Amino acid sequence: MANLVIDIGNTFIKFAIFEGNKILFADQFEDIGNDFFENLCNKFTIKKAIISTVKSENGLWQTSIANNIEVVYFNRGMTNGINNHYKTPETLGLDRLAALIGTKYLYPQKNAFIIDGGTCITYDWIDFEGNYYGGSISPGLNMRYKALNHYTSGLPLVGSSNDFNENFGNNTLSAIQSGVQNGIKYELAGFINNYKNNNQDFNIILSGGDSIFFDTLLKNSIFAPCIKIEPQLVLIGLNAAILNYND
């Protein structure tokens, strides 16, 4: 029997099928059709589902799931041993909480600095005892490119490039790439250094849709040996929450 894990974010709906702690299948869509659950049931025997969402309204496909199996909605009370010291815990994003749970599940008794690259970039620190005090939120990779185009009259819309590896640009296109991509690289290094000064032993967890790209930015840095890439960290955290809920 498998669990269906769904994360409804600002841009994508991500989901995975878990058997225990093993991912059998994972994918993401901008939107999901009403036959979504029926199609999954043709391939997997699903016992229970957990849904995390940033949206207030449910789609018809969610109703279809709830009519067939038990659905648990992830909430801030499902901490799985995370000691949340955030001053406004009710405002902590569910995706960030799930990432903390996923990190503690994968790397117990280990300090960790989580960098999640999606619509926004979030930075969160959790210590080896599961204490969480807060983090940082900044614009994501694509948001930065789009903002330069949207808020100016002369700058074109440029996309990210894995091949760009220069210290500066020599034309408008490469200057934008340098500003965005080098800016993120220096931002990543700055945040990591800030925590490294006070904590020598920790993992750097890269998660989210831009995790592989961020790994490329940091591959030649002194931080490379500490990096763990977990693109499905939020889904892993949600699955850990429902496994604990089952108990």
Image (tube, rainbow, N blue to C red):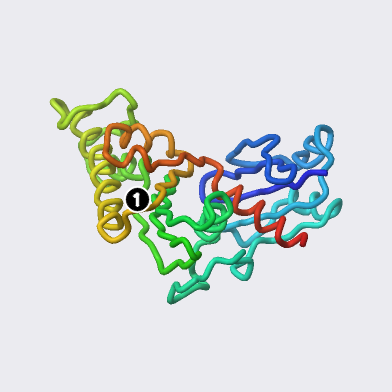
Image quadrant holding the N terminus, namely top right
Q: Nearer the viewer, residue 39 or 110?
A: 110
Q: At which x and y percent is residue 97?
A: 53, 61
Q: Residue farthest to the right?
A: 68
Residue topped by disc 1? 139
Residue 178: name its quadrant.
top left
Answer with left or right where residue 198 lies relative to residue 113. left
**For the point 71% across and 43% down, which residue is it?**
18
Q: At which x and y percent is residue 22?
A: 68, 40
Q: At which x and y percent is residue 88?
A: 46, 75
Q: Please determine whether, in this image, residue 129 is positioned above or below residue 154.
A: below
Q: Residue farthest to the top?
A: 163
Answer with left or right where residue 246 lies relative to residue 163. right
Helix, strand or loop under label 1:
strand
**For the point 28% across and 61% down, which residue is it?**
198
**For the point 22% across and 28% down, which residue is it?**
173
Residue 143: name its quadrant.
top left
Q: At which x and y percent is residue 64?
A: 80, 49
**For the point 58% across and 40% down, which residue is it?**
30
Answer with left or right where residue 184 lies relative to residue 17. left
Q: Dot 1: within a 10 Å radius of its alpha carbon, few (fewer than 14), some, or many (20 or more) residues?
A: some
Q: Nearer the viewer, residue 174 or 88?
A: 88
